[in-house]
Amino acid sequence: MSVAHDEDSGDDAEAFTTIYRRYHTRVLGYALVHSRRDVAEDIAHETFLTAWRKLEEIPSDDPLPWLLGVARNHRLKQLAAGHRREAIAERIERLSDERDTAAWDTGDLVVERAAGLAAFASLPETDAEVLILSAWYGLSAARAATVLRCTKALYYVRLHRARRRLARALQERTHSPAVRLDLVEGNRS
Amino acid sequence: MTPDRVVAALKPAALEDRSEAGVDAAIAAIVATPRSAPAARGTARRPLWPAVAGGVAVAAVAVTVVGVSTHRSGRPEATVVPAPPKASKVPNVQAAALSFTRTGRYLTVKVKDPVADPARYEEEFAAHGLNVDLQLAPTSPKKAGEVLFVEDDGGGRVKMITAPGHCGSDTCGVGIKIPLTYKAFVRVIFGRMPGPGEHYNTGPGDTPGEGVGLSNVRGRTVADVLAEARRKHIGDIGYRWQPTSAAEEGDKQPYPMGIPADKVKGDWRVYDAVAGVGGEVLLFVHPAG
């Protein structure tokens, strides 16, 4: 049983190493937000094994959506295999530390962090997933649609729906007019 | 303040923490694993997801075409053939993937196309004001039509319509019954018959190896299983360590990243064979003795 290497395998290994070093943290981070640490590490490992096997398929100018799409695929396989999952808001709470509370306090966010998290926790998981792709990874609609394997149009619908639900949930918890529902429409990336 | 700012601020700083420890070893272990042959790629293989280019609507491209209508046998031995699923021309105009029937204060939603892209189900649910993520995943024939996974944020008033063992034809009969006013998020995954040669996840009650077209692999030698794989033209194989004691669980095992093929010996024992992503077959192995 020998490993078949072609002439370009050295270049391939170099290209893969670059991708791994640049994106592993973000891929693991994506997995951690959805799954327990041991499961998340499995997901990240499997994602990069897939990346190595399918190196030619990775868009060299923009690997992140490809990688997150594969990570999501591995995550859904875990779900289909019956692994219990935690809600994204539970995962955020578990992953947060004093750095996050400090950053919130200096962030001029009007709402308390607990209220923000509670509002976020009231959302369906699909909403939470879409909001994270947009707000944490700064993915454009086309790139986020690649990750979610849906059309750009459907992604807009989902993002808009999620933003509205979150804005409403924030208003309910804070009675704050500072949450601008009218701004929900804007800011399309 | 926009909702996006709140979401951005909720991102835990810990997610940006880099761990440099073990990175070189991790990369080396991955690079030592075999690549799939370039010849195996191309149009015959279903992409993991459609390429998104400009404003092109991609839902139609994502439809899995695995010829389920020609596939009626309930026996896995008869249904699994070595070739990977062939993609055929996808028509531009698509029939509805779901059927909606109103009975009293409930909406009965049945799956008409068990191999439709989940995004199409979601679009059709959304058109009825429902927030449902329904998927059909290939499964062992005896679990076809059963619920594999369910998540319901709304108190569980959604009823599942199952059709155990009867999910092999185009109209597979599974679906959900949902109150008309239900707004909560529901995610459900039903099992469906695998297409010819299509891999599926296995679990308790399934025969180890059946999900990747192999006969029972448990206890056989690696050499024996590889011989069967060769006969069945399964060439894309990866190896994972099968822990046989608590001391080998998780990161304590010798190869947490997968075992390079040249480290695996022919007399090692096989415990399971499962579907990886993109057609790969993963053998869970352990040295004999």
Image (tube, coloured by chain):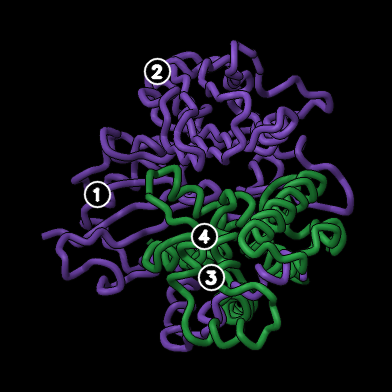
Please tell me in which quadrant of the rendered image residue B262 appears: bottom left
Q: Which mark is residue A114?
A: 3
Say left or right for B45 vs B211. Answer: right
Label 4 is placed on what type of residue? Answer: Ile
| Image height of B63 relative to B282, above or below | above
Residue B261 appearing in the image = no
Closer-to-camera residue (A167/A26)? A167
- Viewer-nearest of discs 2 and 1: 2
Q: Which mark is residue B165?
A: 2
Where is residue B213 drawn, in percent x and y? 40, 35
Please state the chain letter of the residue tagged with numbered disc 1 in the rendered image. B
Please state the chain letter of the residue tagged with numbered disc 3 in the rendered image. A
- Viewer-nearest of discs 2 and 4: 4
Circles 3 and 2 on the same subunit: no
From mark 1 to mark 4, how far is it between C-alphas? 34 Å
Label 2 is placed on what type of residue? Answer: Gly
Q: Secondary structure at mark 1?
A: strand
The residue where tag 1 is placed is B271
Query: Residue at coordinates 61% horizontally, 56% vertically from top-left?
Result: A128
- Viewer-nearest of discs 3 and 2: 3
Label 2–label 1 contact, CB within 8 A: no
- Viewer-nearest of discs 1 and 4: 4
Label 4–label 3 contact, CB within 8 A: no
Label 3 is placed on what type of residue? Answer: Ala
